Amino acid sequence: MRKLTSKSSLLTYIVIIIIAFFYSRDSLVTTSVAGSALLFGLPLAMAAMVGILSERTGVVNIGIEGTLLFSAFLGFFIGALSKNLIFGILGALIGGMMMTLLLALLAVNWKMDQIIAGTIINILAAGLTSFFYKQGYALPSILPRWEVPFLSKIPFIGPVFFTHGPLTYIGLILIIALWVGLFHTVWGLRSRAVGEHPSSADSAGVSVVRLRYINLAIAGAFGGLTGAYLTLELVGSFDRGFSAGKGFTALALMIFGRWNPIGALGAAIFFGTAQAVANQLMITGVVNIPQPFINMLPYILTIVVLAISAGKVRPPAAAGAPYEKEKS
Amino acid sequence: MIKRITALAAAVALATLGFVAPSQAATEKDCAKKAVWCVGLVTDIGKVDDKSFNQSAWEGAKKAAKQLNGVSKYVETQDPKDYATNIALFADKKYDIIVTVGFLMADATAEAAVKYPNVKFIGVDQFYGGDAQNYTGLGFPEDKAGFIVGYLGGYLTKSGKTAAIAGGPDSIPPVRKFIEGFREGVAYAAKERGRSFPAASTVYYTGANAFQDPAWGASTAAQYLTQGYDVIFSAGGKTGNGGLARVAQQKGAYCIGVDTDQWDTVPEARNCLVTSAMKLIPQGVIKLVKDAKADKFPGGYYLGKVGAAPYHDFSSKIKKSVQKKVAKVTKRVIKGTIPTNVAP
């Protein structure tokens, strides 16, 4: 544990030095790139929480993509039809929870293969959102950006972190809250026990099925939050196939972050930074590298970092296995 | 494990089959009859309601079939491996005309043209140089449309920073020609104004979801906006639409749409949308379908028309002198007296 802390503090210093270096050379571009890193990374981080919470309680969830898609769809259309963004957010949350609770029904109650159950979610969401999609609807507005007083005036940190819409702040806070919840509360301990060794948890008096349902509902709310963020705050529109593979990227970032909310947030920000830097290389146009190679950057960097840091990655033991109560 | 893989494969296969639109009055079963004209449309990995490119091709196919009292249907390709399968879906049902949309389908269409000599193929954005008489590539001088909107952008920008977001890679010629035309247009306007703007900045999307990632478009637009860019040409299916929607949230920034008049298709961009670089795809498709019916199908390469969309609400906000200049340049670019200097 001690070794880990020193390693991560070393990493923090390196990041600060790199940012300071670029900031001294071009403050406008550095701030802009960091801001974009958050824009690219945050939805992936929030989506990764869906996977973390599901798998930590022992349900493999490859249906994140479908969860995002369906919640964004519901959020957009409820927001557009009711002309009320609050209803839109609520719609997205309900949409996300509908998808993960369906997964719970398939995987926990009916003990279906969880990979297939997740695939069903993805196909179902793609089908429903395609079939019911209608062009020509628009939101009354998008979620307003709020510059936090005082904090947004801090150089670099202000414009990067404190000039966003409400869901960015809520998302960041909830990711940290999830980390605290998973590792420092009774609920978190029970959840992880159910994910690692359900029969022990059961014999200790924890209802495995009930906890899996509760946690999948919360995971769905995270998915709904992501969908709401994408459609109501970031883009302001919806299209078929809107999530564009973000659910699958989030799945990879969950593993990259070792099923740890803060780890996944870091991984997502790292990925987002690589994406923003790749963009900036093209925007500035100083280096003449073919675009496909520049756009490979986020993926290559991720593979390199994974290769270096891998070795100790281990999923929760009971993830993927439906729980059968032992009969005596 | 084997069971799991086969189940997964079956699920994926189901998903890639795509979605077939509901039928209209005359049904597909009549396609074998000579009197009934059937028009089938196959998209590449884009979607038929992308509010730009595929959508306008489908509109053209639909209208053409309606005018001939025929049948029109579409299939969306989910995976490039299925191009031939999706074309065969229509050819086997004895469709008379198959429209394939997108540069990426050129090879598959050329092969199909040989395999089904009785079917006429219209390849939108495809440059066909072969000699099969039943295949016409419908291309457009996108560089001219890009040049015109770039010229307007060069007059609208206050900061002198202009940008183009491409929803697809520059290995797709129509995408590249739009963008490079835009750059040339901006440079032309800057020269005319006696200003020395930096060349328009460009970002190309080359990930796995080309034309389909609105969030990427929006985030990239945000990156431009925070750096003071105030005219953004966001071109490329849904990815481009995401960029447009994001620019609309910024006061004082202008955005330019692509392919069709996006004032109608992307209402959320109306705060910033001054014009769109249009390809008159529906008109081109309708013309070729009618030619086919009249037994005058040209074969080879057919060049369609381009233009800039009307200003709509911005007509009162853009200076009349600028509008006059743009109108003049538009004419000269279309005619070819002002060369765009973009490689074909």
Image (tube, grey):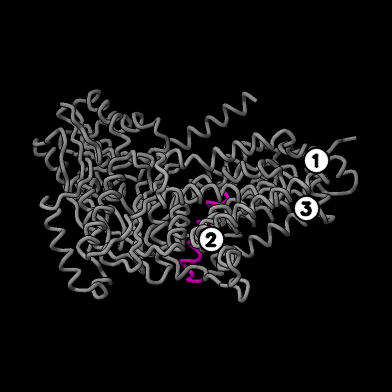
- SS class, disc 1: helix
Compare residues B61 and B315 and report the one nearer the observer: B315
Residue A82 magenta-drawn?
A: yes
State the image coordinates of residue B138 (x, y, percent, origin top left). 20, 40
Check the image and report above or below for B226 versus B125: below
Compare residues B270 and B64 and report the one nearer the observer: B270
**Horizontal arrangement in the rendering, residue A51 relative to residue A205 (left or right):** left
Q: Residue at x 27, y 59 (%)?
A: B276
Disc 3 to disc 2, C-alpha distance: 33 Å
Residue A196 tag number: 1
Q: Which span is picked out in magenta? A: A67-84
**Horizontal arrangement in the rendering, residue A147 relative to residue B75 (left or right):** right
State the image coordinates of residue B225 (x, y, percent, origin top left). 43, 63
Residue located beneath label 3 in the image: A182
Residue located beneath label 2 in the image: A31
Kind of residue indicated by mark 1: Glu
First in sequence: mark 3 vs mark 2: 2
State the image coordinates of residue A280 (x, y, percent, origin top left). 46, 51
Q: Residue at x 22, y 40 (%)?
A: B344
**Horizontal arrangement in the rendering, residue A82 relative to residue B60 (left or right):** right
C-beta proximity under 8 Å, tags 3 and 2: no
Q: Residue at x 48, y 68 (%)?
A: A142
Kind of residue indicated by mark 3: Leu
C-beta proximity under 8 Å, tags 1 and 2: no
Pointer 2 chain: A
Check the image and report above or below for B330 versus A148: above
Give a yes or no on whether discs 1 and 3 share a subunit: yes
Residue B50 magenta-drawn?
A: no
